[in-house]
Image (cartoon, rainbow, N blue to C red):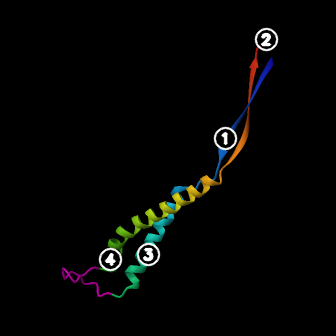
Amino acid sequence: MNEEITERVESARVRRVPKYSVFLLLGAAVGIILSLALTFGIPDEGVSTSTGLEYSAGQVFGFVALGAIPIGMAAGGVVALILDRAARRRSREVRILHERVRSVDV
């Protein structure tokens, strides 16, 4: 059995890319922490001034989290986009050697 080897050299651009999912999850975590800080850090009687209803701390946390988590995720996504743009400028070109080995029956 003989082998036939073919080689080919190509070039490609290589750069580091941020993982968007990590930045989105970190943004969501920042949104949760911000929700906790806003809920328990600001003294309040828990009574709505407009409706007169009383809300528990858990309900207030939920309401605040509904806004803070998406805002945190959006901020994390923007940071990832900025880092992606910066990485695009630092990309470099590399050469790649492709080898194909094919067995040939005689």
Q: Main secondary structure of the magenta part?
A: loop
- In the picture of the structure, the residue carrying the numbered disc 2 is 106
Separation (CA) of disc 4 from disc 3: 13 Å
Indicate whether 26 appears above or below 15: below
Separation (CA) of disc 4 from disc 1: 52 Å
Q: Amino acid at mark 3?
A: Leu
Residue at 32% across / 72% down in the picture? 63
Query: What element does badge 1 sit on?
Result: strand
Separation (CA) of disc 1 from disc 3: 43 Å
Q: Classify residue 70 by image quadrant.
A: bottom left
Query: What element does badge 3 sit on?
Result: helix
Specify which label sits upstream in the sequence, 2 or 3.
Answer: 3
Specify which label sits upstream in the sequence, 1 or 2.
Answer: 1
- In the picture of the structure, the residue carrying the numbered disc 1 is 12
Q: Nearer the viewer's eye, disc 4 or disc 1?
A: 1
Indicate whether 85 appears above or below 13: below
- Residue 60's disc number: 4
Q: Residue 58: say if magenta.
A: no
State yes or no: discs 2 and 3 in contact (Cβ < 8 Å).
no
Q: Which residues are magenta?
A: 44-55
Extreme-top residue of the structure: 106
